[in-house]
Amino acid sequence: MTTDAVRLDRLAPNRPAHVERIDWTGMSAADGARLRELGLDEGASIELLHRAGWLKPGAHACRVGRMIVAMSAAHAAAISVRMEQPSGEAAGPA
Amino acid sequence: MAPAPLIALIGNPNAGKSALFNALTGARQKVGNYPGVTVERKLGHLPLGDGRTPDIVDLPGTYSLDAKSPDEQVTRDVLLGRQPGERTPDLLVIVLDAANLDNHLRFALELIALGRPCIVALNMIDLASRDGLELDPARLAADLGVPVIATVAVRRRGLDDLRAAIAAALPAVDADGPAPRPAPPPAPPPARDSGALRREAARIAARAIVAETPGRRLTARIDRIVLHPLLGPLILLGLLFIIFQAVFSWSEAPIAMIEEAFAALERLIDATLPPGFLTNLLTQGVIAGVGSVVVFLPQILILFFFILMLEATGYMTRAAFLMDGLMARAGLSGRAFIPLLSSFACAVPGIMATRTIADPKDRLTTILIAPLMTCSARLPVYTLIIGAFIPNRTLAGGVGLQGLVLFSLYVAGIIGAVVVAVLLRMGVVKGGGGSFLMELPKYQMPLLRDVAIGLWQRAAIFLKRAGTIIFYTTVLLWLLLSFPKPPESSAVSPVDYSAAGRIAGVLEPVLRPIGFNHEISLALIPAMAAREVAVSALATANAIETSDDEDATAHNLAQRLRGRWSLPTALAFLAWFVFAPQCISTIAITRRETNGWRWPLFMVGYLFVLAYLAAGIVFWTATAAGL
C-alpha cells in the first residue's frame, strides 16, 4: 500500500519509497542519463538519508538500491516519489 | 619486438580499481598522460609467474560507454580501440563492488557485450559480508558467461586466483601464434534500453546473492554524524584546520634534518674544492637555491598525506556533498570541491581533475579559480615569511599564531575564489552549471601501502621539479646575480650592480607603491617559473651579498629578511602570493585543458590585477595602522 506522490526534496528522511516519476525536462540530457546509470529510474526504490545546508537546502543523499547517491536540491525536486506505507522496516544495508 | 599483451582494469568509480591496480603492480607502475589529453594514464607490469609480464592499464572509472566527461571519453575510446597512442586491450578485468552488485552489473553487461575476453573481479567482498551479503561467485560466473574471481584488493586477497585466471585467459588471445598480436578494435555494442539493462542486472544480482542479513551499517552510522547539516560542516572545517596545523608542527624535525644535510654538503664542498667560481656556484647557487626549496618536501608530503587519506577513506565525496550548497551560491557544483581541494596540493593535478566535471562552464570556472587555492608551492614562501615575521607563540586553546596566520592565508584564497567564481558566472562564463550527481562510497580503512605509493609519486614529481626547473632557474639567477661584479671601490652592493639587479630596477617603480623593495622585485622575476623559486632567489641573493661577511652569513635568511623588510612589506608579500599566477606549469596546463591561449591569458591577467590590489591594500592598511 502506498501514499500520495511527493517531491524527493520534501520527503521525510529514512522513509522507504519508490520513484513514481522523474521530470526529465527539468535537467540536462547528460544529467538524466547519469541519473539512470546511478539506478534512478521510474520504479526504483529510494530513501532520503541526508539533506545538507542550514538556511538554504543543499545537496540530498539518498539510498538507491544498495548505493548512496548524492544529488543537488534541483535534481531532488525533479523526482517524484511515492512513500511505502509505514511498516517500521528500513531498506537494505548501508 | 611485439608489444606485451595489454590488460585493462575497468569498472564503475569506487569499485576499488586503483587499489587492485596497486596490489597487482606494486611499484612497477608508470604515471603519464594519454597523448593529446591530460587524462592520467597509469600503466603497470603484471608478472604472471610463468615468465610472461603483460602490461596492465588502470582506466578512469565510468558508469557506461556513454561518456560524459573527458576522462570517461578516454575509457570508452581505449575500450573501443579509438584512443590514439594506446593499444586495444587484449583482456578486460572488470572490477565490481560486491556490495553494490546490481548497480555495477549494468556496466559489466555493457562491457561483456563488447565481445572481448573478460574476467570479473568481484572486489571488496569483505565489505559485502560486513553489510550482510553472502554471494555466490560461481553462479554469477555462470550467468555472465565469464570467470568471476572474488578479491579484496586492499587485503591482497584473491590476487593469486586473479593472476591465474588472467594467465589462463591471455593465451586465448594469442592462440594464432607465439608472438602477441595487437587486438582488433571491438565493434560498439548495439544500443540497449537502459531499463532492460537495469532489470537484467538486478535479476543476475538477485541470483548471485545467496543470503542477506542486516549488516553493521557502519557507513550509515558515520554518515549520521559527518553529513549532519550542522555538525558536518563544523567537522569539515575542523579537519581542514588540523591539516594546516599539522603541516607546520609535524614537519619541524624532518625540515631540520634536511637543512643540516644541505649544510653538511656545503661544508664538504667548501673543505674539498678550492675557492672560486665552481665552489661559489655550488654553494651559493645550487645548494642555497635548490636546498631552500627541497627543505619544504616534508610539508608538501604531509599535505598530500591528508588528501590521499581523505580520498581513501571515502570522506572526500562527503566533503563535496557538504560543500555543494555553498558552491552552488558561487555558481559551481559540489563536484568542483574535489579538484579545488586537490589544488591545495598543486593546481596542475587539480586542473586535470576538473575533467570529471561534465558541464563545460562549471569546468571552465573551476579551472580559472583553481590557482587561487593555496598550493604547496606557496608553502615555502609562506613558511619563510611567517617564520621571519610572525612570533612563534601559542594563543588561547593551544592554537599556534603562525599556524593561524597560515590558515588565514588559505581562507583568503578560498574567499577570493568564491568571489571570482560569482563574478565569472555573472559575466564571461555565464549559463549552465549546478549539476551535482555522485555516488558516496562506503567508508574504508585506507591501506597505508596505497597511500605510500601516492606519496612516493608526488615526492618524485616535486624532486624532479627541484632537480630541473628550480635547478636551472637557480643557476641562471646566480649567474645574473653574480655578474658583472662591481669595481673594488664601488659603494653599490654586488646584487644591485649585477644584471639581475638592473632588471629588477626596471620593475621596482611599478611595485614600490605596494611596498615591494628591490630585493622582492628581483625575486619575483625568476619566480614566474614557479612560486617556490622566490625563496631560492632570496636565498641565493642573500648568499651572494653575505659571502664576504662571515657574521652575516651565519644569520639565516629569515633573520636577514627581518632586518631588511618592514612588517607591512612582509604582509603585502604574503598577500601577493595568495593571488599571483606565478607558475608556468599551471599556465601551460590551463592552455592544454582549454584548447587555446584565450583563457590562460585571461587567468594570468585577472590574477595579477588581484595580486597587485591585495598586496597594495594590505601594505597601505598595515602602514596606516602603524605596524
Image: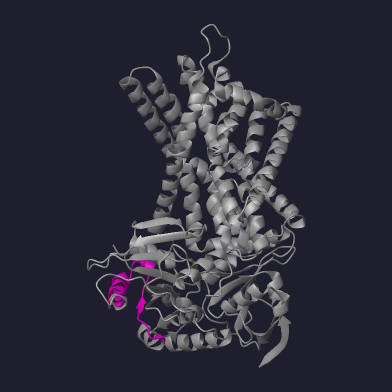
Magenta range is B144-170
The answer to whether residue B429 is left or right of residue B588 is: right
Residue B403 is situated, as x and y percent measured from the top left of the image, at: 57, 40
Q: How is the image coloured?
A: one colour
Q: Which quadrant of the figure has residue B363? A: bottom right
Considering only vertical position in the picture, is B619 above or below B439?
Answer: above
Considering only vertical position in the picture, is B24 above or below B545?
Answer: below
- In the rendered image, residue B154 lying in the magenta stretch gets the answer yes
Write the residue at 72% across / 78% down. Answer: A25
Write the residue at 53% across / 44% down. Answer: B376
Q: Nearer the viewer, residue B398 or B187?
A: B187
Residue that extends furthest to the bottom in the rendered view of this protein: A1
Residue B375 is situated, as x and y percent measured from the top left of the image, at: 56, 46
Q: Nearer the viewer, residue B256 or B277?
A: B277
- Mark yes or no: residue A9 visible: no
Q: Which quadrant of the figure has residue B158? A: bottom left
Residue B623 is situated, as x and y percent measured from the top left of the image, at: 73, 27
